[in-house]
Each structure stands twice: as C-alpha cells, then as structure tokens.
Image (tube, rainbow, N blue to C red):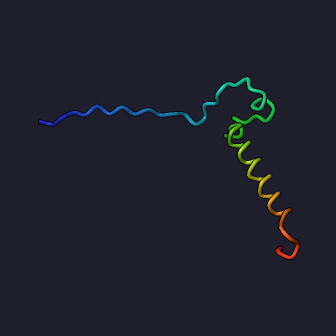
Amino acid sequence: MEKAHAHESRVISSSAKPVSNRPLEKLFKLSERNTDAKTEILAGITTFMTRLHHLRQPEHSF
C-alpha cells in the first residue's frame, strides 16, 4: 500500500509590491527598484567609508 504525502507549497509572487507611506519609499520609489531603505543606507555608508579611506591615503600610494 502506498502512502500519500500531502505536500504544501506556497508561491510568493515577486511582483507583489508592498504598499508603504514611508517618506524614503515615496521619495526614491524603492519598491519599484526592488530594494529597501536598509539596503540603500548600508550602501551609502559603505560608499562613504570607501571614499574616506581613499582620501586619507598618501598620494604616492595610488
């Protein structure tokens, strides 16, 4: 006798856009660009720190 296994699968639509009234979301349309405020803030901090590091290097090291 075969055992029947019930498999439940959920499909999450990647095209679903969250509705948000947050100022950053409205200003930069983050959901349309498939990103969020946390990701963009971390990217900005990373870019700033990288540029700061390059500015503090002696000229002969370039």
Can you say whether 45 is above or below 32 in the image?
below
Q: Is residue 19 above or below residue 7?
A: above
| Quadrant position of residue 32 | top right
What residue lies at 80% left-to-right and 52% top-to-bottom? 48
Tally of numbered discs: 0
Q: Could you tell me residue 31's position as x and y percent? A: 69, 35
Side (left or right) of 3 relative to 32: left
Left or right of residue 7: residue 15: right
Residue 21 placement: quadrant: top right
* Image quadrant containing the C terminus: bottom right
Q: Residue furthest right?
A: 59
**Residue found farthest to the left:** 1
Residue drawn at x 77%, y 53% is: 47
Q: x, y (%) of residue 20?
A: 70, 25
Q: Residue furthest bottom?
A: 60
15 relative to 48 in the view: left or right? left
Q: State the residue in front, 38 or 30.
A: 38
Q: Is residue 28 above or below residue 50?
A: above
Front residue of this view, candidates 45 and 9: 45
Task: Identify the residue shown where x is 74% and y is 26%.
Answer: 22
Residue 61: which quarter of the image?
bottom right
In x, y percent, where is residue 28?
79, 36
Q: Position of residue 16 (x, y in %)?
A: 60, 31
- Quarter of the image containing the N terminus? top left
Q: Is residue 23 left or right of residue 11?
A: right
- Residue nearer the viewer, 17 or 22: 22
Q: Is residue 35 above or below residue 16?
A: below
Between 26 and 44, the one nearer to me in the picture: 44
Residue drawn at x 28%, y 31% is: 6
